[in-house]
Amino acid sequence: MTITVIGTGFVGVVSSAVLSSFGNKVYGLDVDQQKIQSLSSGKIPFYEPGLEELVKSSLEKGDLIFTTSYEEAVSSSDVIILAVGTPSAPDGQADLKYVFSALESLAPYLKNGTIVAIKSTVPPGTNAKAEEIIHSLTNVQFFTASLPEFLKEGSAVQDTLHADRVVIGAKDEQAIEILKELHKPISAPAVVMSPESAQMSKYAANAYLATRITFINQIANLCEVNGANILEVIEGIGYDKRIGKHYWYPGLGYGGSCYPKDVKELAAYAKAKSQNGNLMVKIDELNEERIPKLMEKYKNRVGGWAGKTVAVLGLSFKPNTDDMREAPSTKIIPLLIKENAHVKAYDPITIKTAQKIYPDWNIEYKNDVYETIQGSDIVLLLVEWPELISLDIEAIAKSMNPNPVFIDTRNQYSEKREHMKSLGIGYIGVGLI
Ligand code: NAD
């Protein structure tokens, strides 16, 4: 099949690479000329394990072509997949301007029978609007569909190749069969439903996962006042098969490019549909206040930030990515700077991204984690990169200033906290006494 993927951001590049690796001819299309130039030479503008190899291999075979030309890509494609961004509008609802603009650009070049599938996260009802836009610009017959994306940054290629499921939201039988065929090489059940259900499934999945994170943080708060240990509590509830031991991450709340935006969008969508008092509104509020409240608590525990040297470990929003969208570091570092702390920062791969996006941060970047910790008063562990969760505690104890404090927002050193204390390091975890 010939496919066009519109929007070569994170999702678009992964989809283009994976679909071309199945032997399809894929056009990756973007309005960003610089991005297309870089991708055409095999350079991925962000870090994602395994992606560069996949892109290079498809480029060499000629199965993957990056272009800015709608005419070149769309006029020969059987399936068009929209993967443009859908940021939150000021009222919290999804801003669909990039989706609508892409539809206007593609419509004049559509050939008869093409499927236009929306992969971007959009509210239910968007396909009807998409059909209206295309109809206003062409007389050819086409089908619309929804192909929500469930991959996780940091393991996106593997998640796509070995997905838990492929959700296909479409009404036309012929379109359903073509989309099933397209996804056949992926070893996952294809779940067919209406486009509205498919779009709602995406929001529901992210909202549920965000709720789980918020829930365990609420329980962690209670553990801190009553002497319970959140890790033991997780063990205690996790044996219940209805609950499970997986995906419990007490910490700084959820971040990244999807959960905060999708929860806000679902909350705003519920409000727009007159469903006030929606749970998502509360989840969003609790997540927004999570970091400021914790930082206030930490500030009291360390006796104020002013004049302290703070080693911030981890800048991305999670391990194995250099994506800083809604990363804890983006809220914590400005706060530390404002409070007159001296910030030293380390991340295995995200320093360049931070320097590019936040050129005004007046902080000291280090290329080595132990150099970062050396001479600091406080270590603030924000991301559980493998390198950052296996630090030599004795070496840390020797190199930090007197009365050092280790703030472990990922609970990675909980089992070593007695050891830390015996070496004179104050330990602060989440939901632990
Ligand atoms: P992104 O911001 O990284 O990329 C979007 C790309 O679309 C950009 O390269 C931009 O130049 C391009 N674009 C914008 N308007 C265009 C147009 N008219 N024509 C062609 N290209 C255009 O976004 P992303 O993180 O890849 O997310 C894309 C969508 O997928 C969003 O709706 C997001 O919510 C959803 N999603 C993202 C993830 C994730 O982990 N990043 C996971 C699941 C779903």
Image (cartoon, rainbow, N blue to C red):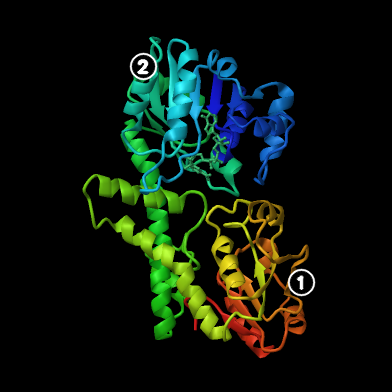
Q: Is disc 2 placed on a helix, strand or loop?
A: loop
Q: Nearer the viewer, mark 2 or mark 1?
A: 2
Instruction: Tell me the residue at 67%/62% (across/down).
Output: 386
Toward the left, the furthest residue is 274
Classify residue 115 by image quadrant.
top left
Question: How many other residues sit within 10 Å of disc 2, few (<14), some (14-19) or many (≥20)?
Answer: few
- Mark 1 C-beta to ligand 1 under 8 Å: no
Kindly indicate whether the residue at mark 1 contacts the one at mark 2 (C-beta within 8 angstroms).
no
Q: Is residue 275 above or below residue 348?
A: above
Residue 119 in view here? no
Give percent across and percent down for residue 119: 46, 34
Give percent across and percent down for residue 107: 45, 17
Residue 374 in view here? yes
How far apart marks 2 and 1 lie (CA) works out to: 61 Å
Q: Is residue 334 above or below residue 296?
A: above
Residue placed under numbered mark 1 in the picture: 370
The three-letter amino acid code for the residue at tag 1 is Tyr
Q: Pick the quarter of the image with the N terminus.
A: top right
Instruction: Tell me the residue at 31%/33% (across/down).
Output: 125
Residue placed under numbered mark 2 in the picture: 136
Give percent across and percent down for residue 304: 57, 83
Give percent across and percent down for residue 269: 31, 45
Left or right of 80 in this view: 339: right
Task: Looking at the image, tell me whether mark 2 or mark 1 is earlier in sequence order.
Answer: 2
Q: Is disc 1 placed on a helix, strand or loop?
A: helix
